Amino acid sequence: MTLPKQLEDAVSRLQEALWTIDQARKKPLSLESLQEWLTALTDYSFALSEIHQMNNESIHEKLHEIAARVHLKQFRSSPRKGNE
């Protein structure tokens, strides 16, 4: 699956989870409504995490492209000790 398709699927799951969260909030407080809310919140968190991961991967790839264009030999991914 291509990255745009993966992102589209994750956004769709995120929107679906938001709708489910909203619907669960409107229900009277019960064990069932809390379970629906928690399940939807979990789905929302997973979708958001996936979107965040794709965003980070995209940024990482772009940084490597920029480093290659300016002829950097090494691209540090973490700060050196003492320079934090």
Image (cartoon, rainbow, N blue to C red):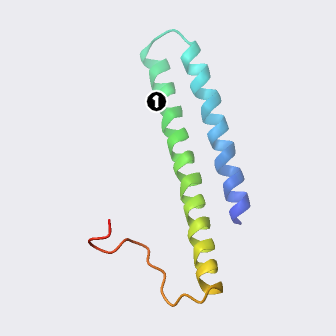
In this orientation, which residue lies closer to the viewer: 82 or 53?
Answer: 82
Residue 49 placement (x, y as % from top left): 52, 50
**Image point 60% across, 35% down: which residue?**
17
| Quadrant including the C terminus | bottom left
- The foreground one among 67 and 37 is 67
Q: Would you say 82 lies left or right of 8 here?
A: left
> In the rendered image of this protein, does residue 31 appear above or below residue 82?
above
Q: Is residue 80 above or below residue 72?
A: above
Does residue 73 appear in the picture of this structure? yes
> Which quarter of the figure is the N terminus placed in?
bottom right
In the orientation shown, which residue stands out farthest toward the front? 83
Describe residue 67's horizontal placement relative to residue 38 as left or right. Answer: right
The residue lying toward the viewer, choosing from 36 and 10, is 10
Q: Quadrant of residue 31?
A: top left
**Where in the figure is residue 82, as x and y percent of width and height?**
26, 71
Residue appearing at x 64%, y 49% in the figure:
10
Give the residue at x 55% y 17%. Answer: 25
User: How many numbered circles are shown?
Assistant: 1
Q: Position of residue 4 (x, y in %)?
A: 73, 60
Q: Residue furthest top?
A: 28
Tell me which amino acid carries mark 1: Leu
Vertical placement of residue 50 versus 36, above or below: below
In front: 35, or 16? 16
Q: Is residue 77 above or below residue 28?
A: below
User: For residue 70, what is the image quadrant?
Assistant: bottom right
Does residue 1 show up?
no
Q: Position of residue 9 (x, y in %)?
A: 68, 51
Q: Which residue is mark 1?
A: 38
Label 1 sits on a secondary structure element that is: helix
Q: Residues within 10 Å of mark 1 (few under 14, many from 20)?
A: some
